[in-house]
Image (cartoon, rainbow, N blue to C red):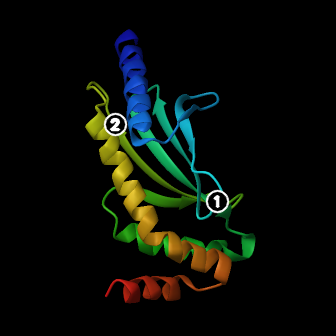
Amino acid sequence: DEKASSNVARAADQLRGVLDAIGWEPEPADGITGFTVDFGPPHVPIANALAAISPDEQFVFYINFGYAAPPDRRDEIARLIARANWGLTIGNFEMDDEDGQVRFKSSVNFSGVELTAELIRNAILPAMTAVEAYADAVADVLLHGKTAQAAIASLDADHS
């Protein structure tokens, strides 16, 4: 409908403004209403982010890790993701079982209301916080062969 379409357009403008204000140099995403952010070399642990506005008035923010889980590590990273997600109140880690890509997703439905800068930031900040908290554990499992249990134990030891 026309009202939702107008709201999506305003949301995209608002999103661009927030990403510019953060200093992330967003680039228009291909084929969707949204933006990609390249965090620059070395692309590890984080490669990029995708901030998208769906036609049904949802803002979705993805943070993509710079490495994928090889087939022999996917079960272990799935265990780590399950443990990490249990303690999160906003957003979640996910893995594509086909290619092993690992990412974090945060979102907000803004159907019928304006997507404000505050709502955008309130979706981005928990995503950044969660990725920062668990990036070392993801790397330990994917790159260093640790078990999910050992990676979580290392995080717990670092924060006690």
> Is residue 118 rendered to the left or right of residue 61?
left
Q: Which residue is mark 1?
A: 66
Q: Nearer the viewer, residue 130 or 83?
A: 130
Which x, y percent locates residue 145?
66, 84
Badge 1 marks a residue whose secondary structure is strand
Sequence-first disc among 2 and 1:
1
- To which quarter of the image does residue 7 belong? top left
Q: Secondary structure at mark 2?
A: strand
Q: Amino acid at mark 2?
A: Asn
Kindly identify the residue that appears in the image at 38 percent across and 48 percent down.
Answer: 124
Total marks placed? 2
Answer with left or right where residue 142 lies relative to residue 63.
right
Q: Is residue 2 visible from the viewing direction of this image? A: yes
Q: Which residue is mark 2?
A: 109
Q: At 30% across and 46% down in the image, what residue appears?
A: 122
- Identify the residue at horizontal 28%, vertical 26% (top origin): 114
Q: Disc 1 marks which amino acid?
A: Gly
